[in-house]
Amino acid sequence: MLRIAVPNKGSLSGPASAMLHEAGYRQRKESKELVTVDPDNEVEFFYLRPKDIAIYVSSGKLDIGITGEDLLIDSGAQAEVILPLGFARSTFRFASRPGAVKDLADLAGRTIATSYEGIVAKHLAERGVEASVVHLDGAVETAIELGVADAIADVVETGTSLRNAGLEVFGEPIMRSEACVIRAKGNDAEDPKVQQFLRRLQGVLVARTYVMMDYDCRAEHLEKAVALTPGLESPTVSPLHNEGWVAVRAMVPAKDAQRIMDDLYELGARAILTTAIHACRL
Ligand SMILES: Nc1ncnc2c1ncn2[C@@H]1O[C@H](COP(=O)(O)OP(=O)(O)OP(=O)(O)O)[C@@H](O)[C@H]1O
Ligand SMILES: O=P(O)(O)OC[C@H]1O[C@H](OP(=O)(O)OP(=O)(O)O)[C@H](O)[C@@H]1O
Ligand SMILES: [Mg+2]
C-alpha cells in the first residue's frame, strides 16, 4: 500500500482532498477521520497537521505527502518537492507599519513575529541580520498593534489581511509557495506506485487547465488555424464529407479558449466547440 500524508485542516486541506477525489481516490467522509484506506487503489491516506507532514514524510514512515513549499522549508525536513499542485499559491513576506522599516538591515536588534520561524531564521542568518524571532501560531498581523513585535513575516495572498491591519510589505519576497507533493530525499524516484499516483494528479492538473476544442474549417485555412490550436503533440485533422473542409480537434489552454474561438471565427472556421476534459493521461 502507498502511504500518503494529506493536510487535515487549513487552506490546504479542502483543495487537496478535492484533487485526490478528482483523481479517483477515496477520501474521508468526515473531518475527524484520521486514516482512510482505499483498497481498490491500494492507497492509505493519513490526515495530519500541515506543519507536520514534511517531518512524517522525511522519516520514511509515509511514502509521500501533500503540503506547502513554505511549510516544507520551514520544517527543515529532508524532503523534496516532486510535483507542484497549483493551489494555495502565496508569497512569504516581511511587513510592518508604513515607513517603520525600510529594508532587511533595519531589522537588526528588532523583534519579528511569525508562525514560520524556520524560514525567517534561515533568511536572516544567510544575510547576517541579527534579530529576535517570536513564534505566534496565527493572526500575526496583530502582533505589531499589540506591541509584541516591530515587524512580522507571514503568508500574503491578496494582501487583505495586511491592509486591514494597516501594515505594508518591505524588502523582496522571502519565498513563493504553492501546494506540492513531497517525498523523502533519496527515496526511489522510480517507485511505480508513486509514479502512478503522480500521473493521476498530473491528469487532474491538465484537465483543469485545458479544454478540448473542435471546429470545421476550409482546407486552405488549415495551416493558419492549427497555428492557433497547435495542441500538445499535434491536432487531429479529419476530412469532412463536404469537399474542401476539414474537422480539427486540439487541446487548448482554458484561459485562452474564448480568444482562440474569436480568432478561428475570423479565419472562417465554424461549428467551434469547446468541451471540458474530465481526466487525462498525457
Ligand atoms: N490566504 C492564503 N492563500 C493562499 N495560501 C495560503 C493562505 N494561507 C495559508 N496558505 C498556505 O497554506 C499553507 C498553510 O497551511 P496551514 O493549514 O498551516 O495554515 P492555514 O491555511 O493558514 O490554516 P490555519 O491558520 O487556519 O491553521 C501554507 O503553504 C501557506 O502558504
Ligand atoms: O493576503 P491574504 O489574502 O489576506 O491572505 C494571507 C492571510 O491568510 C492566512 O491567514 P489565516 O486566515 O490562515 O489566519 P492565520 O493568520 O491565523 O493563519 C495568512 O496567515 C495571512 O494572514
Ligand atoms: Mg493561517
Image: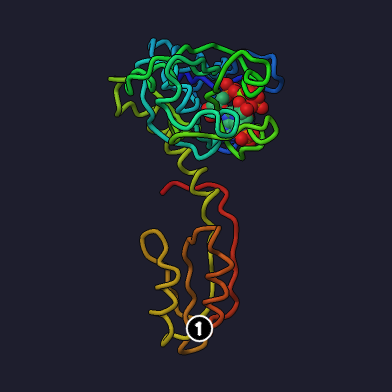
Residue appearing at x 53%, y 47% in the figure: 279
Report the colour scheme.
rainbow
Specify whether tag 1 is near ligand 1 (CB below 8 Å). Answer: no
Q: In which quarter of the view is residue 156 placed?
A: top right
Q: In which quarter of the view is residue 84 placed?
A: top left
Residue kind at label 1, given as amino acid type: Leu
Where in the figure is residue 178, as x and y percent of width and height? 49, 34
For residue 169, side relative to residue 57 (left or right): right
Nearer to the camera, 85 or 74: 74
Where in the figure is residue 35, as x and y percent of width and height? 59, 14
Residue 40, relative to residue 109: is it above or below? below
Residue 247, relative to residue 74: is it above or below? below
The answer to whether residue 17 is seen in the rendering is no
Residue appearing at x 67%, y 21% in the figure: 145
Location of the N terminus by quadrant is: top left
Where in the figure is residue 196, as x and y percent of width and height? 41, 33
Q: Classify mark 1: residues with Cα within 10 Å, few (<14), some (14-19) or many (20+).
A: some
- What residue sits right under mark 1 in the picture? 267
Residue 52, relative to residue 200: is it above or below? above
Q: Quadrant of ligand 1?
A: top right
Name the element at disc 1. Answer: loop
Where in the figure is residue 194, as x and y percent of width and height? 39, 28
The answer to whether residue 63 is seen in the rendering is yes
Nearer to the camera, 62 or 161: 161
Q: In which quarter of the view is residue 197 placed?
A: top left
Q: How many marks?
A: 1
